[in-house]
Amino acid sequence: MEACQKQITVYPNHTESAPVIYLPVVMGDGSEVYECCQELDCPPLTLVAIGGLDWNRELSPWACDGTVRDAEPFGGQAAGFLDELLNQIIPQVESSLPQPPTWRGIAGYSLAGLFSLWALWQTDAFDRAASASGSLWFPGFIDYAHEHTMPSTPDAAYLSLGKKETKTPNRMMRHVLEDTRAMEKLLGERGIPTTLELNPGNHFAQTDLRMARGIRWILTY
């Protein structure tokens, strides 16, 4: 199965050299997140939204069953998307910027939040990461993170979760707060400045604002 055609939308900072944040998006072009960043008075940044993803396939680090019976399984091909990001998307984007970025970050919501953290164990290309309502319940991920080292130590990491996200009958997702706290602890033990923000609502509440808050935190840390 060939990869989906990616849709890249760049919100550049034209005034000065600034960080660049890569944001896989499940739908849309990232404009809502970028607008929220502006409303939050984020420092200058270049935001790169990446759409056209096969969400369950390209953002999951390894294959596993879907979250409920008969649901689409997770394809476990995040390595392929990461390779495309590192070797095609990033060079293409950054060669078109007026100035090189001061540093590079990765951010994501839900399964993309899982991907943004998993990427820190695969490459030293990203200096900071923001995982908003990340799917850290993903089977085996916390154990994987404990058992493997990162190629380098990121400057900072942001985690968030909705306070009602554990109130679910889904057996895979109900321990997401426990897993997110475990990740917070692990990152701290690795010497990475980390914060965990708990937000009102469930997984689907104010998703763009939550993502923007994470981006703002890694920009201002």
Image: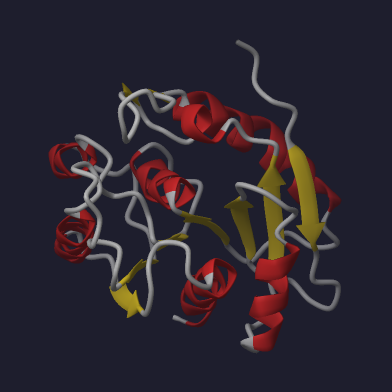
* Total numbered labels: 0
- Say whether residue 126 is left or right of residue 44: left
The residue that appears at 32% across and 35% down in the rendered structure is 67
- Say whether residue 184 is left or right of residue 161: left
Query: In this orientation, does residue 47 appear?
Result: yes
Q: Nearer the viewer, residue 144 or 62?
A: 62
Is the image coloured rainbow, by chain, by secondary structure, or in one colour? secondary structure
Q: In x, y percent, where is residue 16? A: 79, 76
The residue that appears at 15% across and 64% down in the rendered structure is 185
The residue that appears at 54% across and 36% down in the rendered structure is 55
The residue that appears at 31% across and 33% down in the rendered structure is 68
Q: In x, y percent, where is residue 109? A: 48, 56
- Say whether residue 133 is left or right of residue 42: left
Q: Nearer the viewer, residue 107 or 206?
A: 206
Q: Looking at the image, is 19 positioned above or below residue 221?
A: above
Task: Place residue 202 in its image quadrant.
Answer: bottom left
Quarter in which the C terminus is drawn = bottom left
Q: Looking at the image, is 25 positioned above or below residue 154?
A: above
